[in-house]
Image (cartoon, helix red, strand yellow):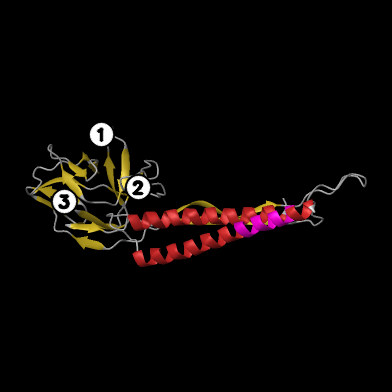
Amino acid sequence: MSITAQILFVGASGAKAMERKLESITNNIANVDTPGYKREGIRFSTVYVPLTQLPPSKPKDPVPTGYIPTYNLALEYAGAIGNVIYFEQGPLRETGNKLDFAIEGEGFFLVEDEKGNRFLTRDGSFKVNSEGFLMTSSGYYVIGKGGRIRLRDAYDVYVSEDGKIFSRGEEAGRFLILKQPVDKRVGKNLWVYNENLAQSSDNFKIYQGYLEDSNVNVVYEMAKMIEAHREFDANLNVVKSGDELFGYLNEFGRV
């Protein structure tokens, strides 16, 4: 790989990495008001590409074009290898709605769709449908230790800190709060649920009449956005300089 091609490659890979970073920051800012949202970032790594070319095998063989007579050279460039999710507790905000619930501590609510596909969420803004089932704002059933949670009276609901649900003075169920390593969102503020990895959490409290706000700090994200824009522009300038150098070398070769 020629020196000019290396310059173009390094600059382009750096710009692509910053593009991924900007997408992540933009997503965080867009979800600053989403209950239970957890901010994300991008994990980068340095990729090494060997550049050394083998010398001619015989003394009379022609020297390969662009041959570098030095060993152990490598091209280093930035590569984005995945998302990082930051699970710091978001602030609890009082809403006064008896069907709003916030988890303080470790764990997720378990929910499922009509077909029984299950997901995890930290968004506790719930409602009750016409049949008395507790639902998420997106229409997913909330799952308790006995299955789908059904209330006798949507206006007479009390939930204790350990997740027990009472309606009309009688226990109507109990929230099933699960802990599980998660790294993949599936939309609608949901996370992939893995039955083989999920475990009951015992390090949490449920607060009725509250929602957990996102853990996104807008000032911090804006500062990171400005930084990423500058890094993106710097990498584009590297590409531009490499392209100009490539043009000069081509002109020189034709003289």
Q: Is residue 241 magenta?
A: yes
Q: Residues within 10 Å of mark 1 (few under 14, many from 20)?
A: few
The amino acid marked with disc number 1 is Glu
- Dot 3 and dot 1 residues touching (CB under 8 Å): no
Secondary structure category for the residue under label 1: loop
Q: Is residue 186 magenta?
A: no
Alpha carbon distance from label 2 to label 1: 23 Å
**Residue occupying the far front of the picture:** 255
Residue 127, given in percent of the width and then of the height, sits at 17, 46
Q: Which residue is mark 2?
A: 199
Residue 44, given in percent of the width and then of the height, sits at 53, 56
Residue 145, given in percent of the width and then of the height, sits at 24, 43
Q: Residues within 10 Å of mark 2 (few under 14, many from 20)?
A: some
Instruction: Give left or right: position of 43 versus 71.
Output: left
Q: Nearer the viewer, mark 3 or mark 2?
A: 3
Alpha carbon distance from label 3 to label 2: 25 Å
The amino acid marked with disc number 2 is Gln
Q: Which quadrant does the C terminus fall into?
A: bottom right
Which mark is on residue 114? 1
Which one is earlier in the sequence, the residue at label 3 or at label 1? 3
